[in-house]
Amino acid sequence: MDNKKAAHSSEWDTEEPLPVAWSAEQVQALREKDPAFSIATVLFLQACLGLVLTAVTWLVSNRWNDAWSAGYGVLVVFVPSLLFAKGLARSTRSKDPGAAMRGFFVWEFVKIMMMIALLALSSLFTGLNWLLMLLGMAITMKVYWICMWRYKSAKAMNQFVDQNVLKQ
């Protein structure tokens, strides 16, 4: 038993080197090597996927209500995400990191409440196919996961969106 205790304590007695702070150049090199998808790219992909899903639903079922159901599911996710992105961009312009953090929580709350409100409003539409609406919501939400899975193409996709979609 003493051997185990001695072996265990020797593991804790060894000192590991302390982490070193990165320079701005090292951080920039990492960002260029592994860029993240911009929120504009995610929103663009959500809108494109939503349009494709709505069109495919209409082509397969040939019913306007089914296409509207899938499209409404896309809108339930896309519109609050768009509002969240706009609000978050505005709140992160502040130099105060606390304001940016508060902005994130406030706009995330607004996004969730707006999604709930849009889901509640869906009861007003007659002929809405709930299964297709939920399918539209689920597929639109999965764009985040697709972006994380395909992060290696983030730089090219961000450049495409910045140059072709966000031209001002």
Image (tube, rainbow, N blue to C red):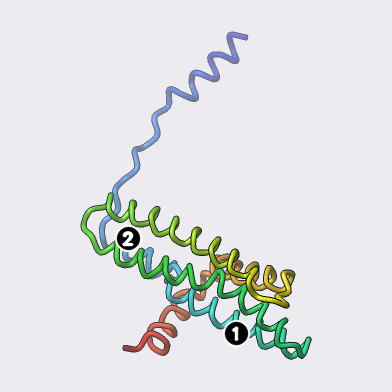
Quarter that holds the N terminus: top right
User: Which residue is nearer to you in this view: 39 or 85?
Assistant: 85
Determine the image quadrant of residue 67. Answer: bottom right
User: Circle 1 sits on which residue?
Assistant: 51
Q: Is mark 2 on a helix, strand or loop?
A: helix
Three-letter residue code for mark 1 = Leu
* Residue 3 percent coordinates (x, y): 59, 12
Q: In this view, does 29 lie above or below 47?
A: above
Distance between the Cα atoms at labels 2 and 1?
Answer: 37 Å
Three-letter residue code for mark 2 = Val
Determine the image quadrant of residue 33. Answer: bottom left
User: Circle 2 sits on which residue?
Assistant: 27
* Residue 45 percent coordinates (x, y): 53, 78
Q: Which of marks 2 and 1 is nearer the N terminus?
A: 2
Q: Classify mark 2: residues with Cα within 10 Å, few (<14), some (14-19) or many (20+).
A: few
Quarter that holds the C terminus: bottom left
The residue drawn where x is 72% and y is 69% is 130
Q: In this view, does 3 lie above or below 54?
A: above
The residue drawn where x is 65% and y is 75% is 125
Q: Is mark 1 on a helix, strand or loop?
A: helix
The residue drawn where x is 40% and y is 53% is 105
What number is the disc on residue 31? none
* Residue 83 percent coordinates (x, y): 42, 69
The residue drawn where x is 49% and y is 25% is 11
- Looking at the image, residue 63 sits to the left or right of residue 75; the answer is right
Q: Is residue 102 above or below residue 26?
A: above
Farthest residue to the right: give it: 61
Determine the image quadrant of residue 53. Answer: bottom right
